[in-house]
Image (cartoon, helix red, strand yellow):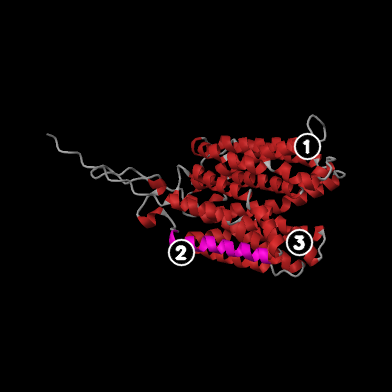
């Protein structure tokens, strides 16, 4: 009678999946610094501080532009001090910044408050959420980034309405304090308990790979490219990626920020009432697209995905360029544009971030991602300004500006076709 087979050792639970949850929580906590939530405070702040629409728009533009400047330093700090320390410091600072924004008394203090929440929320915390995933995953990084953004997109369907309710119940100043307390109460306990910087700290391996069985040879590990920031900026691949991602941020922020004026220019009656309905396809598409685009990012070369995302963005702009030509109602053209742009963003989110990590490695990933986010945040600051000024120069219509935006995607898409993993 043969002896019973010994049970196979159980596969250790990979802590990277816990860190995916932490990254999702961090990304959701950026929302109080994102345009979709910050914009809910515009009217009550204007009324309280007696600011014109142009003044509050200028404060937001200057604040967002300033927020872009120090992001590379945050990335370098994460590389040097470790993610756990930097995420904890940023989370606490962001919570305090939201409270300080609630104390704004005029244009200058409001601009400073906008700069802090945009720098610490949208910029630093958003960058660090991607940095977390890049430390724990390589082959499945696209899927994990998609999971993160599905969670974020679902939260965008809830938090703006919750913010409006908070402002109505408590006033805008106390609502900001509540949001700050929420950020601190979610992230700081996670940092104190389950947060770990990288799998090696727990004796684990990237992607949860198992060590070889006893007696089996060690499989050669893929060498980390380990590009420094200085080496990375000398590659064409990095600048192709740094131009492609921010292009979508520029155009998308411009669309959202000026939705009501765009609808009014198309002859839509009561654009304020229509705005949330025509914008709704965006978060829906952005929620659904990562369900498949993450798999694509792990299995399809970036030189195909990046041009695909840019082509979709150009089609979205083209919808608004022809929205006054008939065929569909202007509101239908706008809703279609939002749906296509949501798909474009989902593809680009899944493609660009993981490609940066794969091309340039983990060793200096924070610094490189910091530069990427600096350019991205600056693009979101300039998008609304470029659209409004372009419309002014074009005589008040937005169609020609969106035609230019669509054409601008063409050389970027062609450059994307040349993407290759750089060599040192």
- Residue 317 seen by the camera: yes
Please name which of the two marks, 3 or 1, marks the residue nearer to the observer.
3
Q: Secondary structure at mark 3?
A: helix
103 relative position to 367: left or right: right
Q: Nearer the viewer, residue 106 or 403?
A: 106
Q: Is residue 15 magenta?
A: no
Magenta span of residues: 174-194
Give the residue drawn at x 80%, y 43%: 263
Q: Which residue is mark 3?
A: 44
Disc 2, disc 1: CB below 8 Å? no
Q: Which residue is mark 2?
A: 192
Say above or below: 204 vs 178. Answer: above
Q: Secondary structure at mark 1?
A: helix
Q: Earlier in the sequence, mark 3 or mark 1?
A: 3
Q: Nearer the viewer, residue 22 or 119?
A: 22
**Label of residue 259 in the image:** none
Circle 3 Cα neighbour tier, 10 Å, few/some/many (<14 / 14–19 / ≥20)? some
Q: Quadrant of residue 43?
A: bottom right
How far from the left and from the top, in percent, is residue 6? 21, 42
Q: Earlier in the sequence, mark 2 or mark 3?
A: 3
Give the residue drawn at x 43%, y 59%: 194
Circle 1 Cα neighbour tier, 10 Å, few/some/many (<14 / 14–19 / ≥20)? many
Q: Nearer the viewer, residue 177 or 233?
A: 177
- Residue 375 seen by the camera: no
Give the residue drawn at x 63%, y 41%: 284
Cα–Cα gap, marks 3 and 1: 33 Å
């Amino acid at each position: 009678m043969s002896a019973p087979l010994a049970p196979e050792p159980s596969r250790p639970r990979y802590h990277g999946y816990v860190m995916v949850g932490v990254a999702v929580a961090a990304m959701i906590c950026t929302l109080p610094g994102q345009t979709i939530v910050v914009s809910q405070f515009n009217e009550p702040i204007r009324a309280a501080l007696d600011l014109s629409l142009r003044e509050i728009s200028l404060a937001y533009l200057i604040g967002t532009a300033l927020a872009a400047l120090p992001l590379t330093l945050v990335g370098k700090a994460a590389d040097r001090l470790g993610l756990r320390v930097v995420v904890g410091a940023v989370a606490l600072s962001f919570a305090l910044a939201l409270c300080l924004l609630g104390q704004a008394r005029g244009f200058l203090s409001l601009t400073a408050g906008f700069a802090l929440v945009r720098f610490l929320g949208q910029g630093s915390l958003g960058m660090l959420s991607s940095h977390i995933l890049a430390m724990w995953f390589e082959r499945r990084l696209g899927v994990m980034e998609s999971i993160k953004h599905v969670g974020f997109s679902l939260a965008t369907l809830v938090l703006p309405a919750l913010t409006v309710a908070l402002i109505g119940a408590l006033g805008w100043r106390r609502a900001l304090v509540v949001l700050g307390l929420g950020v601190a109460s979610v992230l700081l306990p996670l940092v104190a308990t389950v947060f770990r910087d990288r799998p090696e700290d727990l004796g684990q391996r990237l992607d949860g790979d198992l060590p070889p069985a006893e007696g089996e040879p060690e499989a050669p590990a893929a060498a980390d490219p380990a590009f420094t920031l200085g080496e990375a900026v000398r590659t064409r691949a990095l600048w192709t990626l740094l131009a492609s991602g921010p292009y979508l941020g520029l155009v998308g922020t411009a669309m959202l920020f000026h939705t009501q004026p765009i609808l009014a220019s198309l002859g839509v009656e009561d654009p304020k009432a229509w705005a949330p309905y025509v914008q709704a396809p965006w978060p829906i598409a952005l929620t659904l697209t990562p369900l498949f685009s993450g798999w694509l990012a792990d299995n399809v070369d970036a030189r195909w995905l990046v041009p695909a995302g840019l082509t979709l963005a150009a089609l979205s702009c083209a919808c608004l360029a022809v929205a006054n030509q008939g065929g569909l109602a202007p509101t239908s053209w706008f809703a279609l544009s939002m749906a296509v742009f949501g798909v474009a963003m989902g593809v680009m989110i899944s493609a660009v971030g993981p490609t940066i990590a794969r091309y340039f490695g983990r060793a200096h990933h924070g610094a490189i991602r910091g530069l990427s986010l600096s350019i991205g945040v600056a693009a979101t600051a300039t998008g609304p300004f470029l659209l409004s000024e372009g419309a002014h120069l074009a005589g008040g219509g937005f169609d020609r500006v969106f035609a230019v935006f669509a054409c601008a995607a063409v050389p970027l898409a062609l450059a994307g076709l040349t993407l290759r993993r750089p060599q040192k």
